[in-house]
């Protein structure tokens, strides 16, 4: 993946997440038809990024440069599938140093 590919990544990613009946958190990226599960609410942001990186075949080298950051944090954990949460793409300033 090159700098061009990084630029082509979506500026925002829509994610849905909720606590399932098993106590695990379900993370869904509806636009890409991807679903995963994590143990805790604290793992949601990491999993959203891993799902995007895997879907777009982003190498480990670029994982240090590009992150998707949750735009708004809900005050209370979501127990039911409610409205989607947006994650904005963040590209580190050191991006210019990569070939």
Image (spheres, rainbow, N blue to C red):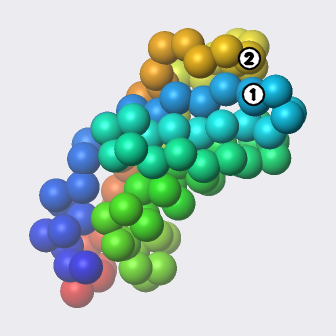
Question: Relative to 91, is 21 above or below?
Answer: above
Residue designated by label 1: 19
Would you place residue 68 above or below residue 52 in this image?
Answer: above
The quadrant of the image that shows the N terminus is bottom left
Q: Disc 2 designates what residue?
A: 79
The secondary structure type at the circle numbered 1 is strand
In the foreground, 10 or 28? 28
| Position of residue 46 in the picture relative to residue 75 (left or right) | left
How many C-alpha atoms fall within 10 Å of the one at disc 2: few (<14), some, or many (≥20)?
few
Q: Is residue 1 above or below residue 92?
A: below
Within 10 Å of disc 1 (Cα), the crowding (few <14, some 14-19, many 20+) is many
Question: Is residue 66 shown to the viewer in this render?
Answer: no
- Location of residue 18 with respect to 57 vertically, above or below: above
| Residue 24 x %, y % | 80, 39
> Residue 27 appears at what percent x and percent y?
59, 39
Residue nearer the viewer, 61 or 13: 13
Q: Quadrant of the C terminus?
A: bottom left
Q: Earlier in the sequence, mark 1 or mark 2?
A: 1
């Amino acid at each position: 993946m090159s700098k061009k590919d990084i630029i082509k990544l979506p500026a925002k990613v829509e994610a849905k997440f909720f606590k399932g009946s098993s106590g695990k958190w379900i993370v869904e990226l509806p636009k890409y038809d991807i679903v995963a599960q994590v143990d805790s609410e604290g793992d949601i942001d990491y999993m959203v990024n891993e799902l995007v990186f895997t879907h777009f075949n982003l190498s480990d080298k670029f994982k240090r440069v590009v992150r998707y950051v949750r735009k708004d944090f809900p005050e209370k954990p979501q127990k039911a599938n409610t409205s989607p949460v947006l994650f904005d793409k963040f590209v580190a300033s050191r991006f210019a140093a990569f070939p």
